[in-house]
Image: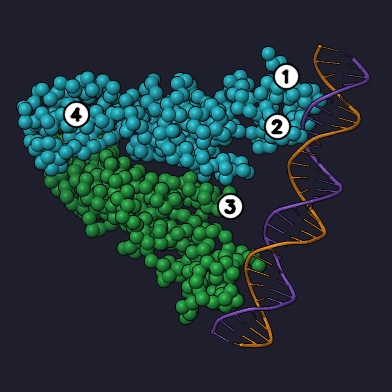
Chain colours: A green, B cyan, C orange, D purple
Amino acid sequence: MLSERRLQVLRAIVQDYVGTEEPVGSKALTERHRLGVSPATVRNDMAALEEEGYIAQPHTSAGRIPTDKGYRLFVDKLAGVKPMTAPERRAIQNFLEGAVDLDDVVARTVRLLAQLTRQVAVVQYPSLTRSTVRHVELLSLAPARLMLVLITDTGRVEQRMVDCPAPFGETSLADLRARLNSRVAGRRFTDVPNLVEDLPEAFEAEDRGTVSTVLSTLLETLVEENEERLMIGGTANLTRFGHDFPLTIRPVLEALEEQVVLLKLLGEAKDPGVTVRIGHENAHEGLNSTSVVSVGYGSGGEAVAKLGVVGPTRMDYPGTMGAVRAVARYVGQILAES
Amino acid sequence: MLSERRLQVLRAIVQDYVGTEEPVGSKALTERHRLGVSPATVRNDMAALEEEGYIAQPHTSAGRIPTDKGYRLFVDKLAGVKPMTAPERRAIQNFLEGAVDLDDVVARTVRLLAQLTRQVAVVQYPSLTRSTVRHVELLSLAPARLMLVLITDTGRVEQRMVDCPAPFGETSLADLRARLNSRVAGRRFTDVPNLVEDLPEAFEAEDRGTVSTVLSTLLETLVEENEERLMIGGTANLTRFGHDFPLTIRPVLEALEEQVVLLKLLGEAKDPGVTVRIGHENAHEGLNSTSVVSVGYGSGGEAVAKLGVVGPTRMDYPGTMGAVRAVARYVGQILAES
DNA sequence: CACTGGCACTCTTCGCACGCGAGTGCCAGA
DNA sequence: TCTGGCACTCGCGTGCGAAGAGTGCCAGTG
């Protein structure tokens, strides 16, 4: 319903505004882009675009800036994903390959994303519920005290203390350890509850209490709430936000500290590809002037977690989406290898 | 060499400036504090204090603000540590007691510190080198692939993958596991290198390569550089810094992201009690307008790591020091229990 | 000798008027 | 449908003057 040229005008406005951070006027547009029409024509188009809600002017007699709706159209229809260049890809790969363990992978990914996009990076740890069990270990620390260690196929390790209701012998421990592993190793975490349900029955009455305690601790660690961790970096990039940012930066930092908020944000993105949420599309109020670009990553075909960046709505969407997608791909590779 | 009253004037200036964030003049001082002298007298004292470098004026005909040197004198001689109130102590304890594992303890501590002091909180994970070994676990993941898991007495867990030069049988694995644990369990990490040095000699020639690989991986995880982790929180409090903070906040955020910088900062504080580093006393340039209040904490009598806060030099030192000290004490208790 | 009141001086801050320039909307004409 | 022209609107920077806060200095007093 918008003519081709008007879409081009919108694209030009977004590009210029992203570049200059200043409202863009009709004259400047015709000078910087070969639209083949005069400023007056562009003005008419702008009036139409404003009528439709794609752009707005901060105050009368200033240039136009895109609205959230304008960015949305830009992302959906006017711009693609800008692929990384070959050297960039190599740099990403090199940077990630030095990682020694999962923490290191995540930490490096955060740094890398923040640096590439010059924005705030968020990386979620591989989810437990979507991983498979590599190994369950039980260690005896004291006669009535065990440590439960869970290892996933993505290299993630979780540990919990278990206080037993009764002393638990070494042989029982070895027995439990062996039975546990034979049942759950290689299985998905979501299946674990069913797989271990009847395990206490295989033990002597005196050990059943302890076995149940161990199992309930195991199941606890799988509870959604505890199992989602993430790492954040590049917050210094927030200072490039704008000139007015005392007001802008505060709520963003607060939102970033609320990991629950971020997890929900990442969780909402169901799209198999790169997801972009612009301005007010983000449920959390503090993020109303930011956009979130996220994507799932995983060691195999399936996504085990998300990563992404948070930046001003005025961001380079094609470039950011390209960087996020590329990083996710390489992180997946690294995880698959380890 | 400074008269008693001049010290009181300095104290009053610091207190007022911390409260109001505005340069304080002679008249306001006499009104808000019962100094028993006239503004003119205070002016003379201020001139003397300025002469000595304890205070300064941002521009002629504005009030005075304390210099780093002034804050230093204030902290050393004029102010004590303000103890937490009983309800505050209870709140701290309650908040920390719900923690389920070490990550959770650290995360809660960060939140707590940030909330109590309304500043940026930094908590270092218990150091490996200053802890003792609780257990070393070796898991066979594939014929020539092991996972090494290290557990400390403070509940910290580190894991590393080990690629073996040759396949390693279950019996050899059990043997190595047993020998390793009998040598190092309960010993300090710093002693580990000496304790395992001759271990390969106890094995058959074909297994020696793998044993050496395992041991060198073990020693690697003890290297200072890798073993120091920390968690940061409350960065949103940076926005309360001042009115001019586009310039101030940026370098601070950058410094906070450089964990190396922070670790060095915490490491430098040798004082057994609360350490305060004010403004330019901090080696890192980005932190020249901040103060760092830190203290060691530990499960026993000895400190295994540090925690602290980073805030503007204009901070409530007595209150901050009290909060930091109290939190450290309770974290120590929690760690000792777990 | 230490403290006090008074006074002149210095700067910053704020409000206000003014002019400039960028950008717009609208209209008549090609 | 596009274009050039024109009047209009506002935000922004500048300059000036008044107000206010704070200082330094000095002479006077217990």
Report, in whole angstroms, how far the alpha carbon at label 1 lies from the one at label 3: 45 Å
x, y percentage for residue A29? Answer: 55, 68
Mark 1: which amino acid? Arg
- Compared across the picture, whether B124 is left or right of B73 comes to left
> In the structure shown, which secondary structural element does the residue marked by tag 1 occupy?
helix
Return the residue at label 3. Answer: A243
Residue A147, picture quadrant: top left
x, y percentage for residue A108? Answer: 34, 44
Up-down relation of residue A196 to residue A21 (above or below): above
Mark 2: which amino acid? Gln
Return the residue at label 4. Answer: B215
Front residue of A223/A26: it is: A26
Asked if residue B234 shows in the view, the reply is no
> In the structure shown, which secondary structural element does the residue marked by tag 3 occupy?
loop
Q: Residue at x 43, y 61 (%)?
A: A317
- Chain bearing tag 2 is B
Asked if residue B51 shows in the view, the reply is yes
Q: Which mark is residue A317?
A: none
Front residue of C15/A164: it is: C15
Crowd rating for badge 2 (residues with CA inside 10 Å; few <14, some 14–19, many 20+):
some
Q: Quadrant for the C terminus of chain A, please.
A: top left
Q: Which mark is residue B57?
A: 2
Q: Residue at x 42, y 26 (%)?
A: B267
Up-down relation of residue A250 to residue D22 (above or below): below
Q: Earlier in the sequence, mark 1 or mark 2?
A: 1
Q: Residue at x 50, y 65 (%)?
A: A14
Q: Are marks 1 and 2 on the same chain?
A: yes
Front residue of A249/A195: it is: A249
Q: Are marks 3 and 2 on the same chain?
A: no
Of circles 3 and 4, the one toward us is: 3
Return the residue at label 1. Answer: B5
Crowd rating for badge 4 (residues with CA inside 10 Å; few <14, some 14–19, many 20+):
many
